[in-house]
């Protein structure tokens, strides 16, 4: 009637190993469920010097080329520039470029809001 139960009675070590594997699998599933239930993307991403304007635009749901225009940044050629590279090209520090990008994002989001 219960082949698994009868197999465990005939082979107790195998039954014990199966039971332990089942417990470990349940614990892993429980932990995965707890991690997924608590996971959510952060509301605000800090702009880092290694980021490109394209990445920043996608994170903030703003057209990256509009950020370039409003913040006065160079348009990317074949290879997009990082914030650090843009700061070096313009002869300024990364904090200034980041501040200009944040101001541009704020301005573009306020223009898009009805």
Image: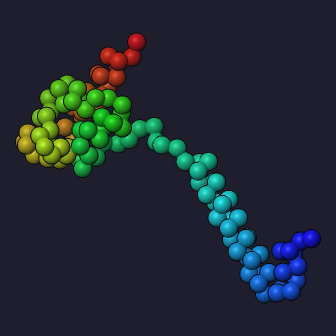
Residue lying farthest to the right in this orientation? 1
Residue 20 position in % (x across, y down): 73, 76
Colouring scheme, one of rainbow, by chain, secondary structure, one colour = rainbow
- Which residue is at 17% across, 26% downward? 69
Left or right: where 3 falls relative to 91:
right
Left or right: where 57 falls relative to 9:
left
Which quadrant is the N terminus positioned in?
Answer: bottom right
**Closer to the camera in the image, 18 or 64:** 18
Residue 112 position in % (x across, y down): 35, 18
Left or right: where 58 falls relative to 70:
right
Compared with 82, 8 (above or below) is below
Residue 110 position in % (x across, y down): 34, 19
- Can the viewer see residue 31 in this picture? yes
Residue 60 position in % (x across, y down): 36, 33
Res. 9 image quadrant: bottom right
Residue lying farthest to the top in this orientation? 114
Left or right: where 54 falls relative to 21:
left
Number of labels in the image equals: 0
- Which residue is at 36% across, 38% downward? 59
Which quadrant is the C terminus positioned in?
Answer: top left
- Which residue is at 52% across, 44% downward? 40
Res. 57 image quadrant: top left
- Can the viewer see residue 92 in this picture? no
Compared with 46, 3 (above or below) is below
Res. 93 image quadrant: top left
């Amino acid at each position: 009637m219960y082949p698994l139960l009868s197999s465990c009675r005939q082979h107790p070590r195998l039954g014990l190993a199966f039971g332990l594997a089942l417990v470990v699998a349940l614990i892993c599933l429980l932990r995965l469920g707890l991690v997924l239930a608590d996971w959510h993307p952060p509301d605000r991403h800090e702009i880092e010097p290694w980021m490109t304007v394209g990445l920043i635009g996608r994170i903030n749901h703003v057209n990256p080329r509009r950020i370039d225009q409003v913040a006065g940044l160079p348009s990317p050629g074949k290879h997009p520039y990082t914030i650090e590279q843009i700061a070096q090209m313009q002869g300024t520090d990364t904090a200034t470029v980041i501040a200009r990008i944040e101001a541009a994002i704020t301005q573009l989001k306020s223009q898009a809001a009805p």
